[in-house]
Image (spheres, rainbow, N blue to C red):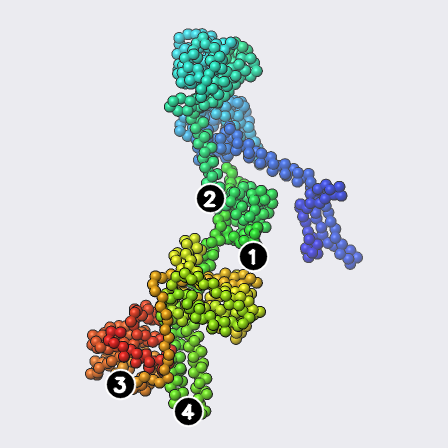
Amino acid sequence: AFRELQARGYIRYEDMPLQTKAGKQWNVEFISNVYLEDGNQVIQCNIRDITERKRAEEALRASEERYRIVTETATEAIITIDENSTLLFVNPSAEKIFGYSSAEMIGESLSMLMPEYLRHAHKVGINRYLETGRKHVSWEGVELPGLHKNGQEIPLEVSFSEVIKRGHRYFTGIARDITERKRAEEALKASEALQRQLSGRQSAILDALPAHICLLCGLGNILEVNASWKQFAFMNNFAGSQAGVGSNYIEVCENATGDCTLGAKGTAEGIKSVLSGKLDHFELEYPCHSPEEQRWFRLTVTPLQEDASTGVVVMHVNVTERKLSEEALSRAEAKYRSIVESLPAIVYLAQPFPPYSPIYVSPNITEFGYSEAEWFNRPDMWVSLLHEEDRERVLSATEAGMHQGLETEIEYRIVGRDGTIHWIHDSGRFVSDEQGNRITWQGVMVVITKTKELEEQLRQSQKLESIGRLSGGIAHDFNNMLTAINGYSDLTLRRLGAGDPLRHNIEEIMKAGERSAALTRQLLAFSRQQLLQPVVLYLNGIITETMKMLQRLIGEDIELITVLNPDAAPVEVDPSQLTQVIMNLAVNARDAMPQGGKLTIETANVFLDPNYVSQHVGVLPGAYVMLSVSDNGTGMSAKTQQHIFEPFFTTKEVGKGTGLGLATVYGIVKQSGGNIGVYSEEGVGTTFKIYLPRVVGQAKKSQTKDSLDDFPRGTETILLVEDEEMVRSLTRQILEECGYTVLEAQNGVEAISLCEKQDCQIDLLMTDVVMPQMGGRELAERFALAFPQMKILFTSGYTDDAVVRHGVINEGTNFIQKPFTPDRLAHKVREVLDAPHGK
């Protein structure tokens, strides 16, 4: 505050709490400014006690809150109109009495709530009052008929008062539905008339009343009953035929038994209390059972005269419909609460100003580790749980939404009691009262943590796919160049003597080419565009075969442990690629344990259920074999784990790694139909889990062929079709050195034209898969009719887009992938030519 004072020269705080020496709490207004006196800065402070004003403000707020509660809970209709009789406010009871919703009434004329014949008189009367200030009738306790939405008139007792606010006149009316009272009064009047004149005409009127009425003398004997009473008393079962004229109704009720005992006993007590003068009237509601249904009645006991000892009127009114409505409302409220509290979302009401203290929270707020009581005991609980990276953004958006009266849709993170991060989608809006005043903020919080995790997995998957497509395209073009570089280097070395001064240079070129070819193979593996040769095998066998090599690779300071399930099911993978996966993971584990440690390789049969699948993008449920590689090294942060499968991403020093090891593992696993996941914690270690689909079949042992140093030779005619000139020229040179006759074309169309012009017999068609104008697959199909004995050898720089998509790779297809060495090409050509026809 003083830094701000020095910067601005002035500060003001309208509400600053201070505490006296005695511990008393003051609220003060604090004003300070700075001025110079004799060259020195002097701070002048003015402090004014505003404790009483604060108390008055608090009292005003409390008064307003009490007014709101009174209006909302009052059983009478409360209505406010302006000078034009326009409805400005109605409370819930007004909606219930008149049958309209508040939205239907607000803004309309008061005349809609009164019968047609009173509207003109009302207009004349209020205009007279506005002009002269003279009331035509009393505004206190006036009985007037109202008009229900269904067109029925409602007897009302109305009181009006006037309020002048800001130069305008407003009128507030309180209307009580006196339908029941009017009925009782009518019945009472009829009873009194009957007591005075027991005439046939008056008895008929009494019988016509819907209420069940009987007149009792001061001793409780029945003097007279109407027709409705006779039916009621018999049906009621606690009075029956005994409750007739001359019987003592008090005794009948006291001796009643059965389901209606409560009503009977209450009736007897009420009559005795009124007759003895203890009560001026008595009311009781009770259920009445019958074989068909249960009904509810309201009992009213009223003295015949001021001296109740002369007798009373007992009246029973059927209130079943009202009770059923109240019960339905209660059930609806209970159902609504049950729905709210069973929602997976968190429903809340909060104060619309900082720190947004909770007014209501649904019970599942405990998901964050804090009880409901804790939320209410700490007003700033929500603000305190906001993630520090999201807090400023969320509070700014919330404040702006409340200030502008807009609905908000915000996603943010909440930190639970145990440190768990919960992603939240929060929808909020203002709740307004009948006047449109914004009174509270209502919202729904939905936990979207799993959705966020899946979105991140999908984003990573799409990113890797995109990088993979780019890498595959680069590798394809690079393979064509490497074929020429490595091939010509190989041919040149074969012609140079051991002491030739150029031999060292060519050897270095060839080493660089071979390293480049290895890098290209890694790119193809990551992009899932390499040619796999899968066989059915057991993971345990591959792991056992690589154990010695692994131990040499990781060093003696790392303990290698295997936990292999002997019943692990077979899988279908390329054994050489699976070996590369294990080696790459072992190298990563070794680098994570510079001081030594434990490397554990484990296999197991697992079943990935729908719950696991729902949390991992691209995973299908089913039976898998798990390959787990774990270390107790340095581990990885969550941020690092998000990028480990990206090509060229590495945490190692420059020159210590290419960043393709895990990218290669990812590509091989995905191309093999499997899935890979990582679980790591800094300072604890890392575990990679690979899931490969189980297969049904007999495992086969992989076989490797020894390469030969000498080129196999032949005299057959070979048609070479290749669109890359460097590759085509090299291939022709290699084949001609092996003794073959070579015809060449740069695409399929040129190859067909060449064969049509020359009368030749072709023994082998060697063609690239993807070429302009006509690809290798279509060319092979056309030549199959013209040269039925011809063998076919396909070649390509990559396989996924160019080979698999073009329908070339299937069982029995002869294929050689670029870059190839002269030796490998010579052996492959001889292998294809020597194979039986059809293979």
For the residues labelled 4 and 1, the Cα–Cα distance comes to: 69 Å
Which mark lies nearer to you, 2 or 4? 4
Helix, strand or loop under label 1: loop
Residue that mark 3 sits on: 715
Q: Earlier in the sequence, mark 3 or mark 4?
A: 4
Label 3 packing within 10 angstroms: few (<14), some (14-19), many (20+): few
Q: Quarter-wise, where is residue 198 in the image?
A: top left
Quarter placement of the C terminus: bottom left
Nearest-to-viewer mark from 3 and 2: 3
Q: Secondary structure at mark 3?
A: loop
Q: Nearer the viewer, residue 672 or 243?
A: 672
Residue underneath mark 2: 343
Residue lying at 37% horizontally and 80% vertically, measured from the top left? 707
Amino acid residing under circle 2? Leu
Q: Which mark is residue 389?
A: 1
| Residue that mark 4 sits on | 497
Estimate the spatial distance between the alpha carbons at disc 2 and disc 4, rounded to whole Å. Answer: 84 Å
Residue 803 seen anywhere in this rendered image of the structure = yes
Crowding around mark 4 (Cα neighbors within 10 Å: few <14, some 14 to 19, many 20+) is: few
Classify 10 Å Cα crowding around label 1: few (below 14), some (14-19), many (20 and above).
few
The image shows residue 269 at horizontal and vertical percentages of 52, 16
